[in-house]
Amino acid sequence: MNENEIEIKDYKVEGEDIAEDRSQQQPTQKKHPYRIHIILFVLTVFTTLIAGALQEGAKLLESPSSITKGIPFSFTLISILLTHELAHYFASRSHGMTASLPYFIPGPPLPPMIGTFGAVIKTNPPIPDRRALFDIGVSGPLAGFIVSVIAIVIGLKFSRVAPLEEVRGVTVMLGDSLGFKLLSYLTVGALPDKADIFLHPIAYAGWIGFFVTAMNLLPIGQLDGGHVVYAVLGRWHRIVSISMVVLLFVLGYMSWPGWYLWGFLTTVLGTRHPPVFQPNIELDKRRKIIAWITLIVFILTFMPEPFKIMEMQ
């Protein structure tokens, strides 16, 4: 018997059954159920504020009030992550599943870190069917992608185009996805030779939003992309999942070594996907169209080489 259970015994007195509650105690209610969510959220806002301020050259030890320089970056990044997770939350609830509010994960704010490792929600399995799995899988990345596009367009308006000769020494250059290149061309136009865009913090947060979208849409295991592939392809999911892990190791050798870490982590976390409760319910036409749109979003946001370390003379 669990300690929170009430022990009940029946006694017969003068022909009547009387239930005696020996403990005379009610199950304890959990107080402040949202406290951990609030604490983690506040910590993440603080660490991303510091990260954004340091990116803008703030000297926080000399002038603590300069942390306000991090507001554009922090607000934009938090908005992207929150939109992503709330989309998962509402999709889960719409299918009758229990889901937690987002748990934000604060991270180191010192460059090159961005002050957070993202956010997650918890859901209780099993997922009812492939339609529910699909809706939950695509909702977060697509919602986050839309907010990221808005952030990039606004941020590029405040960014500046400058000669690369302004950069000296060893620096980390951000890679361009097809989607970011397209938005840059539509917003800023063609760049002069030997020039680049120096991103405003809002645009940088949008770039991170694209990166997060692509990582979540990797068709591996129980990532959002893995959910989508399992919902669409069923038992073929495992083949796609293993193939993508192999591709990550190939990309680690050919372009960015960080893919080795992603390949290792996804292998440890698992390439399998648990079955849904009713696997025979097929996706409807509307969801199949959204699946193609999701594939396009993945192609537009994925970067074979997201970071490049270069020494500028």
Image (cartoon, grey):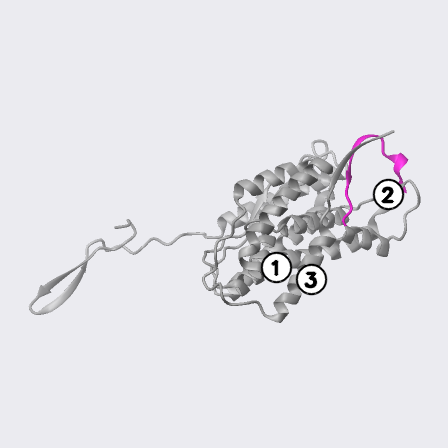
Secondary structure of the residue carrying numbered label 1: helix
Give the labeled residue for mark 3: 293
Residue at x-position 29% and y-position 56%: 26
Location of residue 68 in the rendering, given as x and y in whole percent from the top left corner: 71, 44
Crowding at dot 2, Cα within 10 Å, few <14 / some 14-19 / many 20+, comes out as some
How far is mark 3 from mark 2, CA to CA? 30 Å
**Residue 16 counted in the magenta span:** no
Amino acid residing under circle 1: Val
Location of residue 133 in the rendering, given as x and y in whole percent from the top left corner: 54, 60
Location of residue 276 in the rendering, given as x and y in whole percent from the top left corner: 48, 59
Residue extending furthest toward the left: 14
Crowding at dot 1, Cα within 10 Å, few <14 / some 14-19 / many 20+, comes out as many
How far is mark 1 from mark 3, CA to CA? 10 Å
Q: Nearer the viewer, mark 2 or mark 1?
A: 1
- Left or right of 190? Residue 9 is left
Residue at x-position 83% and y-position 48%: 159
User: Quick one: 245 or 20, which is closer to the camera?
Assistant: 245
Amino acid residing under circle 3: Ile
Marked residue nearer the N-terminal end (1 or 3): 1
Crowding at dot 3, Cα within 10 Å, few <14 / some 14-19 / many 20+, comes out as some
Give the labeled residue for mark 1: 138
- Left or right of 178? Residue 45 is left
Q: Which residues are magenta?
A: 161-177
- Left or right of 174? Residue 143 is left
Marked residue nearer the N-terminal end (3 or 2): 2
Q: Relative to 87, say whether 78 is above or below.
A: above
Is residue 107 shown to the viewer in this render? Answer: no
Give the labeled residue for mark 2: 196
Is residue 293 shown to the viewer in this render? Answer: yes
User: Quick one: 125 or 240, which is closer to the camera?
Assistant: 240
Secondary structure of the residue carrying numbered label 2: strand
Location of residue 119 in the rendering, given as x and y in whole percent from the top left corner: 58, 48
